[in-house]
Image: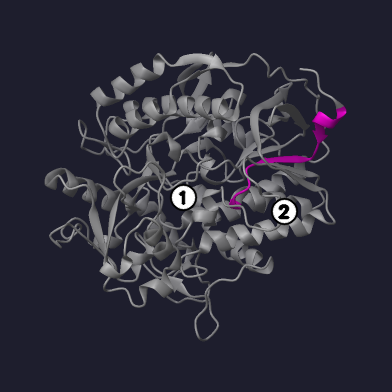
Amino acid sequence: MQLTERDEMRADLVVVGAGVAGLTAAVTAAEAGLRVVVLHKGAAWQADRPEQSTATFYAQGGIAVVDPAAPDDSVDLHLADTIAAGAGLTDPTTSRPILADGPTAVSGLIGWGAEFDRTAAGDLARTREGGHSVRRIVHAGGDATGAAVQTTLSRRLHAAATTLPIECVDDSIAVGILRAAGQVSGVAFRTGDRDRVVHAPTVLLATGGSGHLYAATTNPSGATADGIALALHAGAVVADMEFIQFHPTMLHVDGARGRRTLISEAVRGEGGRLVDAAGRSITDGVHPRGDLAPRDVVANAIEARLAASGDPCVYLDIRGVPDFERRFPTVTAGVIAAGLDPSSGRIPVVPGAHYLCGGVLTDVDGRTAVPGLLAAGEVARTGLHGANRLASNSLLEGLVMGRRAAAVAAARRGRPIAEVDPDVHGVLAPMMDRRGLQDRMTRSVALRRDAEGLAGVAADLAHATVRPVRTVADAEDAALTLAARVVVAAADARAESRGCHTRTDHPQTDPIAHTRSFGLIDGEISVCAGSDVIADIQALVP
């Protein structure tokens, strides 16, 4: 394509995404002297409001982080809880340093202006959520932690831009990772009807998740698996894609599609109880921790009760939560906005697509198998989450890995790159109708799966229409279609039930835990040797 000087940009680091991982990396790198360009589908550059199109903004519960002064908590205990929730697939060698860096990362965020809830004595207030042994989750605004984190990072971004070489391009979508001589050389992206390029030796994917593979999700509208598709087309490898976490308590509204209100797990940590229409407990006898069991356990218990009763939802009984509306103002507002009355004491909930536990395979510093291509946050698979993410470990991972990715970018600064002139015109990609894809995934590749259902979705995907990628919607539909192909392939290959992947035709759990990795070879999803990929990553220079 013919580019004008105005269409070309140059940077030391390109960050694709503006949530917790992306903005942490961008600001950290800029403060280290790097030229940074942030590409974002939303409007992070508008100073009059915090960006609301990221999953970070909607995170409620908090940040799971050890209090170094607490006699009843430690990194070892946090790691043990993380491993237990991860159902045998959490990697302790990468997880320990991520968890250990948590206190420093949170302190850094406070240094940037974040204000967390505190006790009367002035200490950080901490709550407990499912899967945690102790109260270690710090929070802000009661249940508005994500909004506080996003606001802090957005303000820091604007402050940095007054004196540092950092720029954010709003309303843009990355359409391809540029490579030359086996190295990353930049990003092709689109703003409106303009095709543009950023030339850079390092690119960080921080695009978030893939919740809109399903008809209803807690994710914002931009969670369309963009980073997964970009990484696969660039030659990177993905792993654990079958593990899509369904949060146990998404607000139930008859017939609603798209983003739905999340009911924070912290509600149960403060005394909320899951009950059916008759008031009977959902989790009694299911797990020793009851309603505070790991998310996969609670979500499956709800699904089993709904299947047995035929009811459309279960209920979160909040009558035992002291001063509910003050402690959980975000949840209260969401319930009222849906036309429901929280003062009734019962909130209708169902499990909802919430978090991709797998993603682009990286090492503990965010490096992928493609030199110069990094990934952090929900789009990445570091090994922290295993087969099921522990509550409130996501914001922690985003903060820590954003800082680590910035350090890698700083080490790569000044590397010579070959500037590539991309050809983005005439790009063709298989696409399924989004609504049809979401309905098929919801019916056959959600909480419970079997070979017949997976085969049916695979057949539909194989007949997806190949169309030109001309618009943002086209790029998103192509990304969702490709991501669905990988999720279905991974779910079909895992003939067992583990974590948030339940096979009704294979209810047992294999005593030998294993991770499967996939790549895109000649347009086909192919199994890769994940251990070899990690070894290759670790052998790379920064």
Q: Position of residue 65 (x, y in %)?
A: 50, 64
**Residue 89 visible within the image:** no
Q: Position of residue 11 (x, y in %)?
A: 80, 39
SS assignment at label 2: helix
Residue 451 sits in quarter = top left
N-terminal of the two: label 1 or label 2?
2
* Quarter of the figure that contains the C terminus: top right
Q: Which mark is residue 92?
A: 1
Who's the residue at 19% across and 57% down the image? 282
Mark 2 surroundings: few (<14), some (14-19) or many (≥20) residues within 10 A: many
SS assignment at label 1: helix
**Residue 47 visible within the image:** yes
Name the side, left or right, on which 65 lies relative to 299: right
The total number of labels drawn is: 2
Say which amino acid is labelled 2. Val
Q: Which is in the foreground here, disc 1 or disc 2? A: 2
* Quarter of the figure that contains the N terminus: top right
Name the side, left or right, on which 101 lies relative to 218: right
Residue 487 sits in quarter = top left
Q: Which mark is residue 27?
A: 2
Q: Residue furthest bottom?
A: 121
**Span colored in magenta:** 5-20
Who's the residue at 83% across and 38% down the image? 414
